[in-house]
Image (spheres, rainbow, N blue to C red):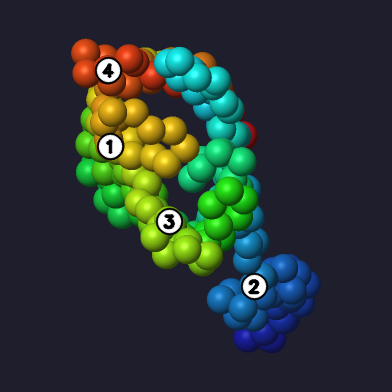
Amino acid sequence: MSNYVEVARCAALAIALSPACQMHAQGEPANPSAAPRAVAKVPWKISITVDGYLLPDRDGYVNPTVAADHGWLHLETRYNYENLRTASAWFGYNFSAGKELVLNVTPMIGGVFGRSSGIAPGCEASLSYRRVTLSLTNEYVFDTHDSAKSFYYSWPELTYSPTDWLRVGLVAQRTKAFQTKLDTQRGFLLGFSHKHAEFTTYVFNPGWTDPTVVLEVGWSF
C-alpha cells in the first residue's frame, strides 16, 4: 500500500511542476545564439570650420569647410581653400589605430573646380600621444586644363594642450590662395575650446615678412 502512496505522490508532483516547466521553456529561445541582436547605430559627426584670412596690403578672404564622418566614411567640401574662388568636394576613408599613441589617417580623393580645376588626391592624418598632437593636411592638385598649374598644398601642425580647453603650437602652410616672399609660411597658434566650439588664432611669418593672421572658428556636433 505504501508503494501506491509513493507513486501517487510522485505523479501529483510531476503534474504540479509541468506548467512551470512549460512556461520556462517557452520564455527562452531554443537556440540562444539565434536570438535577434540590437544593431548599434553609428552616428554622423558634422564639423563646420570658417577661417578668416587677414593679409598684409591686400584684401582678406574667408575659407569655409564642412566635413561629415559616418564610421569609415568621410565627406568634405571646401571653398577658397585650394585657390580663391575655387571649391572642392572630397571622399575619404577613416582609419584609426592605437590607444595611448593614437594614429588617425584619412586618405581622400577630391574634385577641384573654379579658378583652379582638376583632380586632387590628399590625406588628413594625426598622431597623438597624451597632450601632444602632430597633424598634417595635404593634397596635390593635378590641373586638368594646364599641367603647369598643378601644385602641392600642405598644412602641418604640432600642438600641446596644457589643459582640455587650451592648445598652443607651431604651424606652417604652403598654399596657392595667396603668396608671400616665402614659399612656405610658418608661425604659431593659440586655440581655445568650449564644449562643441573652438576658436584658434594663427600668426604666420612673424619676423620674416609682414605677418598674416588667420582667425578660425569651428563647431562640431
Q: Sort mark 1 into few (<14), some (14-19) or many (20+) by Cα contacts within 10 Å.
A: few
Report which residue position mark 3 lands on.
149
Q: Residue at x 39, y 40 (%)?
A: 175
**Real-space Cα separation, disc 2 to disc 4, in angstroms:** 68 Å
Residue 48 rendering spot, x and y as whole percentages: 60, 34
**Real-space Cα separation, disc 4 to disc 1, in angstroms:** 12 Å
Instruction: Label 2: state its secondary structure.
Output: loop
Q: Earlier in the sequence, mark 2 or mark 3?
A: 2
Residue 42 rendering spot, x and y as whole percentages: 60, 53
Quarter of the figure with the C terminus:
top right
Whether label 2 touches label 3, CB < 8 Å: no
Whether label 4 touches label 3, CB < 8 Å: no
Frontmost residue, 31 versus 161? 161
Residue 84 rendering spot, x and y as whole percentages: 55, 39
In the rendered view, tell whether residue 155 sits above or below residue 97. Answer: above
Horizontally, residue 41 falls left or right of residue 122, namely right
Q: Earlier in the sequence, mark 2 or mark 1?
A: 2
**Real-space Cα separation, disc 2 to disc 3, in angstroms:** 60 Å
